[in-house]
Image (cartoon, grey):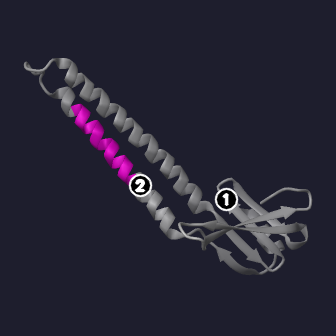
């Protein structure tokens, strides 16, 4: 953390910070919670079927199949919940700070500080939704050595 403070001090006064939108993060978090609950429900259903007595009318293989299906579905829901949680954390870690002498781009991998002298080109690409109007923009900073941020 002390390194980012020195980067911010070198880049001068903070002009503006851009944080990720709140709604996509809430959707990811809500979907992760839903998947965890569904996974737990499937595990509980499997446990109830396991503890139920064998039936005389149907063979016991149907009960075993129901247990296996519930366990597999529970595991799939938990894996999906973990993936959604990782996406949520990645989403929340993104940030762009504009300073007087440069910019700091922060992602889940770390932060990159660039002065305005190091930036050769700024590319702006629209991101379209269901219409022909742009709903968001993707900015790419190209340095003189060819690296893209």
Q: Residue at x 81, y 78 (%)?
A: 12
Find residue 107 and name its label: 1
Find residue 87 and name its label: none
Instruction: Determine the residue located farthest toward the front in the rendered image.
Output: 132
Q: Residues within 10 Å of mark 1 (few under 14, many from 20)?
A: some
Asked which secondary structure carries label 2, the reply is helix
The image shows residue 116, relative to residue 144, as above or below, that is: below
Query: Picture coordinates of residue 148 (x, y %)?
Result: 80, 58
The image shows residue 18, relative to residue 51, as above or below, that is: below
Query: Picture coordinates of residue 25 (x, y %)?
Result: 50, 63
Asked which secondary structure carries label 1, the reply is strand
Q: How far separated are the C-alphas under marks 2 and 1? A: 22 Å
Q: Residue at x 44, y 58 (%)?
A: 29
**Apparent side of residue 86 relative to residue 38 in the rendered image (left or right):** right
Which mark is first along the chain, 1 or 2?
Answer: 2
Query: Picture coordinates of residue 129 (x, y %)?
Result: 56, 66
Find residue 31 and name its label: 2
Instruction: Determine the residue located farthest toward the left in the rendered image.
Output: 56
The image shows residue 66, relative to residue 121, as above or below, that is: above
- Which quadrant would the N terminus be assigned to in this image? bottom right
| Of residues 101 and 66, the one drawn nearer to the viewer in this rendering | 66
| Of residues 148 and 18, the one drawn nearer to the viewer in this rendering | 148
Instruction: Give yes or no for contact between labels 2 and 1 (Cβ–Cβ under 8 Å).
Output: no
User: Which stretch did the figure color magenta?
Assistant: 33-47
- Which quadrant would the C terminus be assigned to in this image? bottom right
Q: Given this view, does label 2 or label 1 mark the residue nearer the observer?
A: 2
Q: Quadrant of residue 42?
A: top left
| 148 is within the stretch colored magenta | no
Query: Picture coordinates of residue 24 (x, y %)?
Result: 50, 64
Magenta stretch: dominant secondary structure: helix
Q: Residues within 10 Å of mark 2 (few under 14, many from 20)?
A: some
């Amino acid at each position: 953390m002390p390194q980012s403070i020195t980067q911010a001090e070198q880049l001068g006064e903070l002009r503006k910070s851009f944080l990720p939108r709140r709604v996509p993060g809430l959707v990811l978090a809500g979907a992760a919670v839903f998947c965890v609950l569904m996974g737990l429900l499937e595990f509980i259903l499997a446990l109830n079927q396991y503890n139920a007595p064998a039936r005389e009318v149907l063979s016991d293989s149907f009960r075993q199949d129901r247990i296996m299906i519930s366990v597999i579905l529970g595991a799939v829901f938990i894996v999906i919940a973990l993936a959604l949680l990782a996406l949520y954390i990645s989403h929340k870690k993104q940030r762009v700070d504009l300073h007087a002498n440069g910019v700091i781009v922060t992602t889940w991998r770390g932060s990159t500080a660039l002065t305005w002298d190091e930036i050769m080109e700024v590319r702006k690409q629209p991101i379209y939704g269901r219409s022909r109007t742009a709903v968001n923009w993707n900015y790419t900073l190209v340095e003189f050595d060819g690296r893209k941020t």
